[in-house]
Image: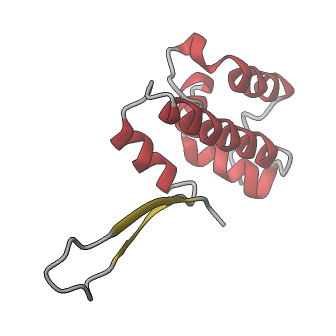
Amino acid sequence: MARPTKWSKELETQAYEYIKDYQVHGHMIPSIEGLAMVLDLHRDTLYDWAKDEKKEFSDILGKILNAQEFWLVQNGLNNTFNSAITKLVLGKHGYHEKMDQDITTKGEAMPTTIELVAKK
């Protein structure tokens, strides 16, 4: 027999409130882990709800990730966030660095191009 779920409309409401006011909890960016802490649940429970039990909960997790990506880019560009941490977390959103080097020149400075490539 399966364990009864803790899911409720109240938890869903709290989740949407977290997306809007994650900073009230001292969080720099919204995150699934942060939501799990606020709801006093394990993050695996949230993933299970999104996958199996409550499909509409996947919308909540998606909105958290969208907000996280937005604030990482905004605060990374205005240098509010640590660039190394911002780059690391944006890697989880599909961003990566692309570096091209021309190593065919002889005795001259080798041109290097570094660009931020958005997720696909």
Q: Is residue 111 left or right of residue 71?
A: left
Q: Is residue 64 among the parts visible in the rendering?
A: yes
Q: Which residue occupies the extreme top position in the image?
A: 24
The location of residue 71, given as percent across then percent down, is 60, 32
Q: State the residue at coordinates (48%, 35%).
A: 76
Q: Quadrant of residue 36?
A: top right
Q: State the residue at coordinates (44%, 41%).
A: 86
Q: Is residue 41 among the parts visible in the rendering?
A: no
In front of the other: 117 or 101: 101
Q: Quadrant of residue 110?
A: bottom left
The location of residue 92, given as percent across then percent down, is 51, 55
In front of the other: 1 or 78: 78
Q: Which residue occupies the extreme left position in the image?
A: 107
Q: Is residue 63 left or right of residue 92?
A: right
Q: Is residue 93 above or below residue 42?
A: below
For the C terminus, the quadrant is bottom right
For the N terminus, the quadrant is bottom right
Q: Is residue 116 left or right of residue 21?
A: left
The location of residue 56, given as percent across then percent down, is 86, 46
Say how many tags the image has. Answer: 0
Q: Is residue 99 above or below residue 65?
A: below
Q: Is residue 72 above or below residue 15?
A: below
Q: State the residue at coordinates (47%, 60%).
A: 115
The location of residue 13, given as percent across then percent down, is 81, 23
Q: State the residue at coordinates (36%, 32%).
A: 82
Q: How is the image coloured?
A: secondary structure
In front of the other: 36 or 71: 71
